[in-house]
Amino acid sequence: MGRAEERRARQRGGRRAAPKGRRAAAAGGRTGIRRLFTWKKIVGTFFTLCLLGMGAFIVLYMLIDIPEGNADAELQSNVYEYSDGSLMARDGDRNREIVDLARVPKPVQRTFVAAENKTFYKDSGVDLKGTARGVLNTLSGKGAQGGSTITQQYVKNYYLTQEQTVSRKLKELVISLKLDREKSKDYILAGYINTSYYGRGAYGIQAAAQAYYRVDAEDLTVEQGAYLAALLQAPNQYDWAIASDKGKKLVQERWDYVLDNMVEQKWLDAGERAGMKFPVPEEPKAAPGMEGQTGYLVEAANAAVKQQLVDQGVAEDLEQAKALLDRGGYTITLNIDKKKQKALEKAVKDRLTSKLDPKKRDVDADVQAGAVSVDPKTGKVVAMYGGVDYVKHYTNNATRKDYQPASTFKPVILAAAVDRGAETQDGVPITADTLYDGDSKRPVVEDGKKVGFAPPNEDDRDYGDITVQEAMNKSVNSVFAQMGVDVGMTDVMKTAGALGMSENLDPFPAQTLGTMGASPMQMAGVYATLANHGKQVTPSIVKSVEHKDRTIEMPDPVGGSVISRRAADTVTSVLTGVVDDGTAKVSVRDNPLRDGQQVAGKTGTSDDNKSAWFTGYTPDLVTSVGLFGEDPKTGKQVPMYGAGGVDRVNGGGFPAEIWAAYTFGVLDKVSEFDLETQQGAGVAPTRSPSQSETESETPSQTPTTEEPTTSAPPSTTSPPPTTEPPTQTPTSPPPSQTQTTPPPPTFDLPGGPDEPLDNDRE
């Protein structure tokens, strides 16, 4: 049968077997992989899966009802305790007040829709593409990514949890669809703006309006509403009062985005939009119960807990950690010792704030104080002073990093020199007895070439050849500028970072004057590491954290050695000279409460007198006290000349007096440093004072300076120096120090009790 006949037979409905060869060929064509995956099977499988998915979704839709508000929606307080377990503070009821949507101006309502979900009034309550993307991201481990509608966000906030799981996202989808069918758009929008978190402890639009603009929700302008709507994306990052420059830029861009969307939706006139200006929020106002020092302590504890939530992997970032903490339910025990805390507050009041009178001197209103006290053996922050009152001055002066530590940085340079075995440009090892040229404005030299830096000493004083010990005592800038270059500024900055200062500090010579920013908390950590023989101490304010749903383990504040014990102990020994023979002796050495207590420390006063410091320690307690000039209206840094009735606020004045009144008042016993070094002021001279005077290079003609006390202005002349008698017998070092090699010759450095000037200068 030919092909024509076969075709006619098929048309008549008849069948005829094909030749065997063709049957075999046809059978062979459908074997193997092509038989398994025909287009009919693929299409059928696809539709089967779709039907199964639809069926499963219908089952879920029938089984899942709109639940009651979850436990997380019933927000709790956080409890804060002193180290002994006694109550410090309770953050109170949640700052939230539900308001009817009718009380919120319609244009303000629309700012939230423009910010989060432009199709809100038209959609079915879900964003299928965004939800699918979120599910895929969750399955692939990319975390919380993917868009969602206002309805979905409200469901997540109020009915579900913040966990990122497929089951939670599917529940969110079903409940959102049901909620959109059963409730009006106004009901959903009201729930969304009333339950969302806006930062500053504010839940809901009414609390947010008060927190940021001191108005009720019904009085919000469109501009203000747009800021609050923009804020929801990242409340902590976008809070104008604490935002970085990048954060401020981002929130302004987000604000523009909201208003531009309103114009696009024809909810706002383009001409009116063009004339709108960004509404800068009011400064934060502390919650009730946070008055005095309590708010500063709670704020510092919260910062530590949030960081640990991130480090432990409980939260992805600080924003999420803040959201977790703000939901409440935490019992946070601080390391703060109630007795020491009260003593520190009293010392600041007695030695500083009681002497400030803005009615007599305008500059007195510019003085801010901050202090941190640390146990160097455990790293516990046992006391902290953040400012005059958390309600009156929101910024915590104990943790702020925007003021220069000035000459309190000099010990870091010496620590780097000794730890790294550095040498002078002439190849002489740098020790406490190494001689340097102490003349003012002496050019700093590296490899025989001037580096373009020649810092002046205080009052432009020349010292001639001077030992490192005496240069530390008198805070001689020219010596430590050269020493920094001798060590290598990169190595100095690495040592600074290892000791607890900010990482990646710029390694230029001017940093030897302490021109970077630092906080009392950081400087307390640096000096605590020195007191702890080089083992790193990171000040820790939180003792423990308890929560019913999660375990949070705080890190050990004490780590391994970051510099050698020899280097740390050498610096400690040298710093005892600052107290006994240098810029702090009037306030500290001669204090009647000292009772023989060994003390090491360093003063610091920045250029233009914008900051003044004293950071000092005993074997059992390290405390850093800083005074900062701040314009109360603008927040800008300003000089403190004349504050408290003194010509210049120096580290050896108010800060050292606060330190001494506090430290000597809380110590239970007199203690001595256990030092493994043969360098520094702790070593007795090997020659008599008369020999030292005759063999040193005309020390009687070397100008000596010290910071003034709060009652005496700087002097322009120096009295004839007197020689302090040695505190040990000339032939043996203190019993607390271990010697392995004979000590190098040291000299008793001359210095008069009336030396009035400090040498600290940026």
Image: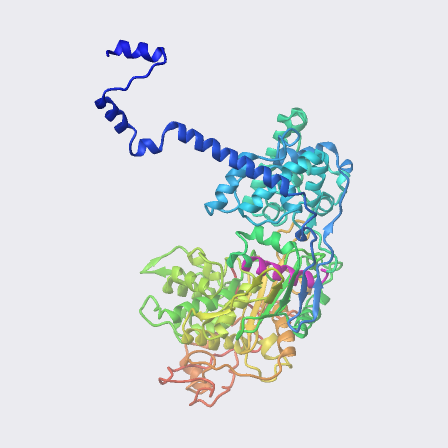
Q: Is residue 754 magenta?
A: no
Give the mark count: 0
Comparing 410 with 740, the one in front is 740
Farthest residue in the left direction? Answer: 21
Image side of residue 258 versus residue 749, left or right: right
Place of residue 239 in the rendered image (x, y in percent of width and height, measured from the top left) = 62, 46
Quadrant of image for the N terminus: top left
Region in magenta: 290-308
- Among the 4 quarters of the image, the one containing residue 117: top right
Comparing 736 with 322, the one in front is 322
Up the image or down, 551 lies above or below 128; here it is below
Q: Is residue 514 visible?
A: yes
Q: How is the image coloured?
A: rainbow
- Among the 4 quarters of the image, the one containing residue 334: bottom right
Q: Is residue 462 visible?
A: no
Comparing 336 with 104, the one in front is 104
Name the dominant secondary structure of the magenta segment: helix
Image side of residue 596 versus residue 644, left or right: left
Image side of residue 464 versus residue 363, left or right: left
Residue located at (39% from left, 69% from top): 417
Residue located at (37% from left, 56% from top): 451
- Among the 4 quarters of the image, the one containing residue 717: bottom right
Comparing 577 with 168, the one in front is 168
Up the image or down, 62 lies above or below 650; here it is above
Residue located at (68% from left, 46% from top): 67
Up the image or down, 225 lies above or below 632; here it is above
Place of residue 438 in the rendered image (x, y in percent of width and height, measured from the top left) = 43, 68
